[in-house]
Amino acid sequence: MENPTAAKVHAPPGGFLRRYVFSTDHKVIGIQYYLLALFSVFLGMTLSALMRYHLVYPGEKQHLFQLLWPNGAPDGIMTPELYLSLMTMHGTIMVFFVLTTAPQSGFGNYFLPLQIGAPDMAFPVLNMLSFWTTLLSFLVLCSAFFADGGAPLGGWTAYPPLSATGAIAGPGMGTGMDLWIISIALFCVASLMGAINFLTTVLEMRAKGMSLMRMPLTCWGWFVTAVISLFAFAVLLTAGILLLLDRLGGTSFFLPAGLVISDRVLDHSGGSPLLWQHLFWFFGHPEVYIAILPGMGLVSTVLSVFSRKPVFGYKAMAYAMVAIGLLGFLVWGHHMFISGMSPYSAIAFSVLTLAIGVPSAIKTFNWLGTIWGGQLRLTTAMLFALGFVSVFVSGGLTGLFLGQPALDLYFHDTYFVVGHFHMIMGVASIFGIFAATFYWFPKVTGRMMSEPLGKIHFYCTFLGAYAIFIPMHFAGIAGNPRRYADFTQFDFLKDLASVHKFITHAALFTAVIQLLFLWNLFWSWRRGAKARENPWNATTLEWALPSPPPAHNFGINPPLVKRGPYDYSLPQGGKDFLMQHEGEEE
Amino acid sequence: MLFAGLIWLTAAVVAAAFAMKRWWFPPPINTYAANFDSYFSLNIAVAGIIFFLAQAALGWFIWRFRNQGRRVRHTEGNNRLEVVWTAVTLALFLAASVPSAVLWSRVHLDLLSPTAMSVELLGQQFAWNVRYPGPDGRYGRTSARFVNDAAGNPFGIDDGDPAGKDDVVSGALRIPAGKPVLLRLHSRDVIHSFFVRELRVKQDLVPGMEIPLKIEADKPGEYEIACSELCGLGHHQMRGLLIVMPPAQFDAWLRQQREARQ
């Protein structure tokens, strides 16, 4: 689409502040989001390492704990409330500021306009506002650490009445909990702004010839994710406001009559704790797809590029994403099988939940179909994409158990669930982020990341992920409940000490290995080998530009798109790919 | 082809670790739990086979289609294959939902005969309380105003209600072996969850709701009740005991408790 005004707006802005800080350039904003996610993921990972340490050495004094949390670990031993607050913050940081932020807001911002041949996102100022609101949300969340009583201990799911009754329910449930809710509400606002921007950009800003069915699958991933975000975050925002009202305004949306907490009789009445769970999971389950769909699109692209084959079943892949997006809103009840909701509705939710396995399986089959018959270039990006398929299968299959209420009856809230969702939501999404980083790094910086370092990092992380999360399933089968600050109070948990010790050691190893990635990223940014133009011989439009791309992208001459996004190994001979704007109109 | 080998190795180790069953369920203590175990075994077998085949295929493809500098044949997909694998997975998942629904119904939808014994279980931060009605089967009226843990009245039983005079309050959940018991689950503060591994059953206790749960245990013994919904800083120590007694012994115990009340 020709848009001279936007091009004028994006004449390279002068001044450091306008260019790198308060920038309206989607590429700078994408990098800002990515760096926020990078900081968050290391913070969240560090919290989990501390938690894992405490779980297997509950009685050992650690000066570090005391140093960091003089109140939470007065004699160097983590108190249960400190453990639970770290757990809450770990979950919140990872889900919102890593898995929602990097794949969609980070990569999506940077590459969606480039891949569809647009000069920028549809609303550049709104885009900047989304980022700064997200950053504010992050700062508010972190400030909960310093609140009186510390960060909240109610988990990232924040179930009332625990989350709704204030400081009497436990340390951190006063100011810390208020800050948590405010942070999440701000995050929702930022995500809604982002969703509107993404939707408008996809629908209005595509270059001539870029029909929806010619978009790279990454764009389909960001598009469907934006639709999900629009509906899901709107509901979470509402729920957060209601919860805040219950806490501060004396309402009773989530609080029934007759509560006695810390020997005090509360005068709320008429609310239902289950209402929160319905609202939360109406957001919470689609959130899983917000985290994974952009990765699915990216993995499809990377498998295709490095197999030198078109994506197998492009249409099926695009429709499967749409189906996942739709069905994702109909399955929230599987988080509530044992919550006390009607056992009849559990059966309905179960069937719908199992049904969502179908588009997921379609995607897996098509990924295998894509590499079948290819000539695989095992770059680090490709290894992470293949690793994604492996963990997606592993994590998806355990979902088969949890989607059936009869089995969930036992596994609900055990380590089986922890293993399951870390595998499919955590590891798979993060493998998608890693693949994207290695794949697009030359585009963003003009340099290559180190492949040897990247491969060592990949192999260690792949083995580490299995070593951490598969044993958690065994703990779950043995009945180990999650969210326990230590395992010393129950006889049956003592038998699992060796499992947990193994998990902790694997986790510490894997955490340390991530420093390799950090080193690789920043070292290559400054010193990496110069990248060729289009180093992967890829077909999509971002590779038609110099690296890094100029401030105004394609300027006033957007490319005319002539073909689909994955024209590899065409039968006519010559070079083995045609970019989307090359050759004859298809 | 390091990665192909690594995937095969991982798949083999994971499959072997599951087959070992070193960390597994405790022995079941009723027929429902035994049915649960066999249904789980079926699921783990099916999932295990799919897991192993998928990972093995992935590893094999990586090895088989390693780059040898050949020209790739251009193909964009195959509609017949799409239909086949969509249909197969749909059939598999729908097939799973039927026996699963039947098993679920056995816990939640089977109606109890009205004479089944009923016991009230109350969760609080961070303890379990149990209440048995008198011989008339009626529980005394309760109110939050009368709750007093120090005086041994965690339920808040109203002394003004004669029906409450013969209620028995206990810290452990004692039930007679081989008889169905209707648990009436309550919480007075936050959400807790009742979980006994040997029963293969878990159910939340939600403030403001009474949730019925049928349990039955055939094997006398002591089993741990582990709170399974995050309820605050003491969540990890919210341990209770389910004590399954031979029926005669249980009757004697209950009678004794009632006499002690009067």
Image (tube, coloured by chain):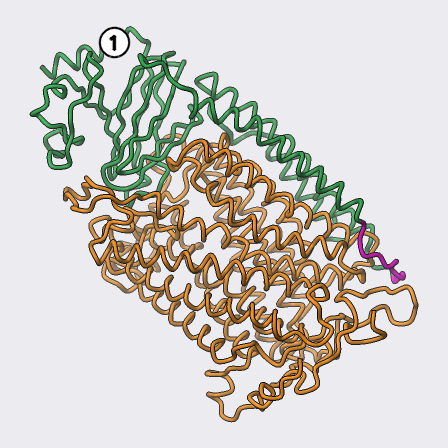
Chain colours: A orange, B green
The answer to whether A69 appears left or right of A515 in the picture is left
Q: Position of residue A250 (x, y in %)?
A: 20, 54
Q: Position of residue A499 (x, y in %)?
A: 49, 39
The answer to whether A264 appears left or right of B137 in the picture is left
The residue sitting at 70% across, 82% down in the picture is: A558
The residue sitting at 54% across, 61% down in the picture is: A227
Which corner quadrant holds the C terminus of chain B? top left
Disc 1 packing (10 Å; few <14; some 14–19; many ≥20):
some
Q: Position of residue A88 (x, y in %)?
A: 37, 54
The answer to whether A90 appears left or right of A511 in the picture is left
Residues drawn in magenta:
B69-78
* Quadrant in which residue A446 is drawn: bottom right
- Residue found farthest to the bottom: A14
Judging from the image, mark 1 belongs to the subunit labelled: B
The answer to whether B256 appears left or right of A335 in the picture is left
Task: Give the answer, above or below, for where B222 lies relative to B192.
Answer: above
* Residue type at the position of mark 1: Asp
Label 1 sits on residue: B251
Q: Main secondary structure of the magenta part?
A: loop
Task: Give the answer, above or below, for where B159 lies relative to A224.
Answer: above
Q: How many marks?
A: 1
Task: Give the answer, above or below, for where A445 lies relative to B93.
Answer: below
* Quadrant in which residue B43 is drawn: top right
**Helix, strand or loop for disc 1:** helix
In this rendered view, identify the residue nearer to me: B16 or A278: A278
